[in-house]
């Protein structure tokens, strides 16, 4: 089970919930990048620091910090290079989920991640 951040100002609320539920191997977090930026008050680095030890999934979408627009990565203000470097440092990668709300955004999301993070299959 992954607890997803929605309207929390920072990771402390989810950390407290996880502590109360007990830290089991099947329990962790889903870091929703867009929610953190549009509803949270903590930086993505702070969210990462708070959740990284129990990160099971990430929802990848962007925004301008004012609304949960589900824009393709690279169209908003998210620190995609920073997120990539943090992911690269992980022993085990979380599930990465794209969240386009329009079909054209799916293709733009794939192109955006390719541009920002490179070819995941190493055939750049």
Image (spheres, helix red, strand yellow):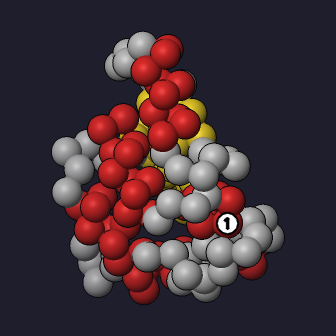
Residue beneath the point at 40% across and 82% down: 116
Picture quarter containing residue 65?
bottom right
Residue beneath the point at 61% across and 58% down: 40
Q: Does any portion of residue 38 appear in the rendered image?
A: yes
Judge from the rendering whether residue 10 lies leftward or rightward of residue 22; answer left or right.
right
Judge from the rendering whether residue 68 lies leftward or rightward of residue 52; answer left or right.
right
Q: Does any portion of residue 121 appear in the rendered image?
A: no
Judge from the rendering whether residue 108 lies leftward or rightward of residue 26; answer left or right.
right
* Between 94 and 121, the one nearer to me in the picture: 94
Check the image and report above or below for 123 versus 92.
below
* Between 94 and 8, the one nearer to me in the picture: 8
The residue under label 1 is: 38
Picture quarter containing residue 83?
bottom left
The x and y percentages for residue 120 are: 33, 68
The x and y percentages for residue 29 are: 48, 37
Picture quarter containing residue 36?
bottom right
* Between 20 and 32, the one nearer to me in the picture: 20
Residue beneath the point at 38% across and 18% down: 23
Residue beneath the point at 55% across and 81% down: 77
Check the image and report above or below for 98 versus 81.
above
Q: Looking at the image, how many numbered discs can be counted on the residues?
A: 1
The quarter of the picture where the C terminus appears is bottom left
Mark 1 neighbour density, 10 Å: few (under 14) some (14–19) many (20 or more): some
């Amino acid at each position: 089970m992954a607890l997803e951040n929605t309207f929390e100002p920072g990771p402390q609320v989810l950390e407290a919930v996880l502590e109360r539920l007990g830290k089991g191997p099947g329990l962790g977090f889903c870091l929703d990048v867009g929610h953190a930026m549009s509803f949270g008050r903590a930086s993505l680095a702070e969210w990462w620091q708070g959740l990284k030890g129990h990160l099971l999934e990430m929802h990848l979408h962007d925004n301008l910090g004012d609304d949960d627009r589900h824009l393709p990565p690279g169209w908003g203000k998210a620190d995609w290079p920073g997120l990539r470097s943090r992911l690269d440092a992980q022993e085990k990668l979380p599930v990465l989920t794209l969240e386009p709300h329009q079909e054209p955004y799916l293709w733009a999301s794939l192109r955006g991640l390719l541009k920002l993070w490179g070819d995941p299959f190493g055939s750049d």
